[in-house]
Image: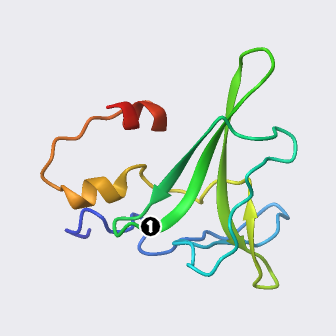
């Protein structure tokens, strides 16, 4: 086990193999600087009411989580991550990171490793705290 509190839990592998006939895609983290900007709208859920950026310990972007409100007052959340498909072309997908999911606020935690940590239910609560 590593003594580095920010080391990957899976030994550095960011992409587990896909099974059950699903396409083999690799999650690209961190997102390269020259990558096209992520979409601002979901094809069915439309524009998000809020969006949170996930960063690694150095501040590099790992992906996003978007909140969508429906007409009945309900809410849903969709991760937005960069994946590289079989043709090695990066594409933003409304799909989550492979496990283990990155920790929201990791960049802030890395900047202050001795600060107290408050565990919150979601991104909005973490920002409010």
Percent across and percent down for residue 127 are 39, 37
Mark 1, secondary structure of its residue: loop
Q: Is residue 1 left or right of residue 72?
A: left
Q: What's the residue at 50%, 65% (across, down)?
A: 61
The answer to whether residue 108 is left or right of residue 25 is left
Q: Alpha-carbon neighbours of circle 1 within 10 Å: few (<14), some, or many (≥20)? A: few
Q: How is the image coloured?
A: rainbow
User: Which residue is denoted by mark 1 in the rendering?
Assistant: 10
Q: How many marks?
A: 1
97 displayed left or right of 101: right
Position of 117 relative to 85 (above/below): above
Which residue occupies 66% across, 54% down? 80
Can you tell which quarter of the image residue 85 is in?
bottom right
Please name the residue shown 15% across and 47% down the image.
Answer: 115
Measuring 81% from the left and 60% from the top, which residue is drawn there?
A: 20
Report if residue 101 is visible in the image: no
Q: Is residue 123 above or below residue 74?
A: below
Q: Is residue 27 visible?
A: yes
View extreme (bottom): residue = 87
Residue nearer the viewer, 77 or 3: 77
* Image coords of residue 24 (percent x, y): 76, 73
């Amino acid at each position: 086990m590593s003594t580095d509190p920010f080391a990957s839990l899976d030994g550095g592998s960011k992409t587990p193999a896909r099974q059950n006939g699903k396409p083999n895609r690799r999650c690209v983290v961190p997102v390269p600087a020259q990558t096209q900007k992520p979409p601002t709208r979901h094809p069915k859920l439309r524009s998000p009411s809020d969006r949170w950026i996930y960063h690694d310990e150095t501040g590099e972007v790992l992906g996003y989580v978007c909140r969508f409100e429906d007409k009945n007052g309900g809410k849903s959340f969709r991760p937005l991550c960069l994946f590289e498909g079989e043709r090695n072309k990066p594409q933003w997908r409304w799909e989550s990171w492979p496990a283990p999911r990155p920790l929201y606020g990791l960049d802030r935690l890395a900047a202050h490793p001795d600060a107290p940590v408050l565990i919150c239910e979601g991104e909005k609560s973490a920002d409010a705290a």
